[in-house]
Structures are given as C-alpha cells and as structure tokens.
Amino acid sequence: MPADFSITAKPSLNPVHVVSQSLLYGTNTKLDVDIEVKNSCNKIWKFPTYLGMKVGACEIEGTLSWSDDEGEHQIPINGRGVSWSMRALL
C-alpha cells in the first residue's frame, strides 16, 4: 500500500462527465496535491481471500487553481485528513 501519492485533476472531455462537470469547462479548474500517509495501521486477512486495509492520518499539500473574468486564482491547500485504502487478491 502506498505511503505517498499525488493527485492531479482537471475537467474531463469524456461525454459521460459532461453534465456533472459542465460548470468547470469555462474556468480551467485544476487540482494538484501531494498526500503523505503517516501513523498508518495495516491489517491483512488471509481467509477466504487475501484482503488488506491501511488506515492512517495523512498530510495534504498542494494547490487549487482556476481562471475567470477577474483573472487567475490559486489557493494553497495544506491540511490533515484520514486515508483509507483497501486491496484484494482474488
């Protein structure tokens, strides 16, 4: 299970997401964050299948940016949260 990961997101041009992301197209919205999981607890169950879980506190750092009629805006994101990851080997 990863201890660090990054997320980069922007509106999709996929027709499936047109309705849910329609307000984002004109604003050039972007999310770019790095997440570091700390103090995690791992648990693996071996029966009836290998199922693993990792829960822990995480620190997040990055930016949310967009542009509109007033110019470009960039908001720094710094905070803490909870990470919950699961995996299965079938």
Image (spheres, grey):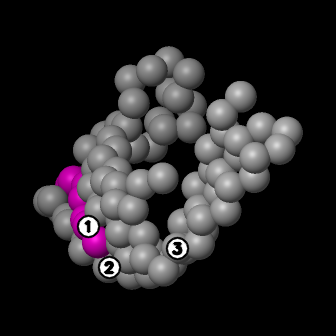
Q: Which residues are magenta?
A: 61-69
**Disc 3 residue type?**
Ser
Image point (34%, 55%), residue name: 5
Using the rendered image of the protein, determine whether residue 29 is visible from the camera's viewpoint: no
In percent of width and height, residue 57 lies at: 51, 78
Judge the density around disc 2: few (<14), some (14-19), many (≥20) Cα neighbours within 10 Å. few
Image point (34%, 45%), residue name: 9
Q: Which residue is mark 1?
A: 62
Q: Which residue is mark 3?
A: 40
Q: Earlier in the sequence, mark 1 or mark 2?
A: 1
Q: Is residue 60 left or right of residue 68?
A: right
Foreground pick, 4 / 9 = 4
Residue 3: which disc?
none
In percent of width and height, residue 16 lies at: 56, 22
Q: Which residue is mark 2?
A: 78
Judge the density around disc 1: few (<14), some (14-19), many (≥20) Cα neighbours within 10 Å. some
Depth-wise, is mark 3 or mark 2 nearer the camera? 3
Q: Earlier in the sequence, mark 1 or mark 3?
A: 3
User: Is disc 2 placed on a helix, strand or loop?
Assistant: strand
Foreground pick, 37 / 17 = 37
Q: Is residue 57 left or right of residue 50?
A: left
Quarter of the image where the C terminus is located: top right
**Disc 2 residue type?**
Asn
Image point (39%, 30%), residue name: 12
User: Mark 3 and mark 2: span between their CA atoms?
Assistant: 19 Å
User: Mark 1 and mark 2: span between their CA atoms?
Assistant: 7 Å
**Disc 1 residue type?**
Gly
